[in-house]
Image: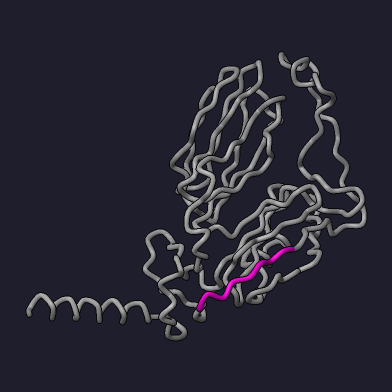
Amino acid sequence: MCRVLASVIVAGLFVGCSRASNDSPASSKASNVTLASPKASNASLGVAEQNGNWGDVKGAIVWGGDKLPERLPLDLKGHQDSKHCAQKGKLLGEEWIVHPKNKGLRYTFVWLAAKDKEAMIPIHPSLKESKEKKVVMDQPICMFVPHAVALREGQSLVAKNSASVAHNFKYGGGTENPGANFLMPANTERAIDDLKADRLPVSVECGIHPWMRGWVRVFNHPYYAVTDENGAFELKNAPAGDWQLMVWHGSGGWRNGAKGKNGETITIKAGATTNLGNLAYPPPPAN
């Protein structure tokens, strides 16, 4: 009898906890929602109940200036590996890569965040676990490929050198990801398994080829993307409701400068695709 009574009490406590929310009581269906918990935070959901309401959101980040930035050839003159690096043609700078026809801005990070920075984002059951365990950043011909990658905490970043010459891989970004610097002989790779989700980006460099630079961002939820050659992005099975859309580029920082560091409020429709259209990324002020 005592055991039965104890079980009832525990079950009651569990149900009571599952209904806790900053804004409103959660539905009994909340057991199907996985939360992405911020580090060292016990903050509650802080958003309206989800009840299985999910939707997709898509759009494109486009260059906001009239004149498109030009990709200039890199000066490899006198470098010991210049012949290897130029074997497939001139290397072009990757500071800004803009599509000449539709002005799409490539390698821009886009992700969702809660307005309350301590709140948690509900995760669709199908996205509870990352399907891919590894994300690869290669150095085949004296450039990082891809130039920018995003991953989820728990995934491995594989630093790869498929070239016939040596590279080194220097990475780091803030106290959460202090990084390291290691030599990579030809045709080797090394897994980095301890990257933590953080608001700060992780920069990547090669000291042997000083023009090389790449970017990594790490998240504790699956609602992020890096724009493609058309500047396009899409976030699938995102929680419906109001969220902050964050946009950041390695060469210009936050979209709209300091005003954009907290993102832009968007409303994701349940059971539908929310098309944000073209979002202009204004060129940063000239130094």
The residue positioned 59% from the left and 60% from the top of the image is 223
Look at the picture and state if 45 lies above or below 36: below
The residue positioned 62% from the left and 29% from the top of the image is 206
User: Percent position (x, y) of residue 177?
Assistant: 48, 44
Magenta range is 51-58
Query: Who is closer to the viewer here, 179 or 109?
Result: 109
Left or right: 230, with 110 as reference point: right
Give the prevailing secondary structure in the magenta stretch.
Answer: strand
Residue 257 within the magenta-colored segment of the rendering: no
User: Percent position (x, y) of residue 176?
Assistant: 45, 48
Residue 54 within the magenta-colored segment of the rendering: yes
Left or right: 104, with 199 as reference point: right
Which picture quadrant has residue 184? top right
The residue positioned 25% from the left and 81% from the top of the image is 12
Left or right: 151, with 264 as reference point: left
Query: Who is closer to the viewer here, 16 or 169?
Result: 16
User: Percent position (x, y) of residue 6?
Assistant: 14, 77
The residue positioned 75% from the left and 21% from the top of the image is 85
Query: Who is closer to the viewer here, 93 or 154?
Result: 154
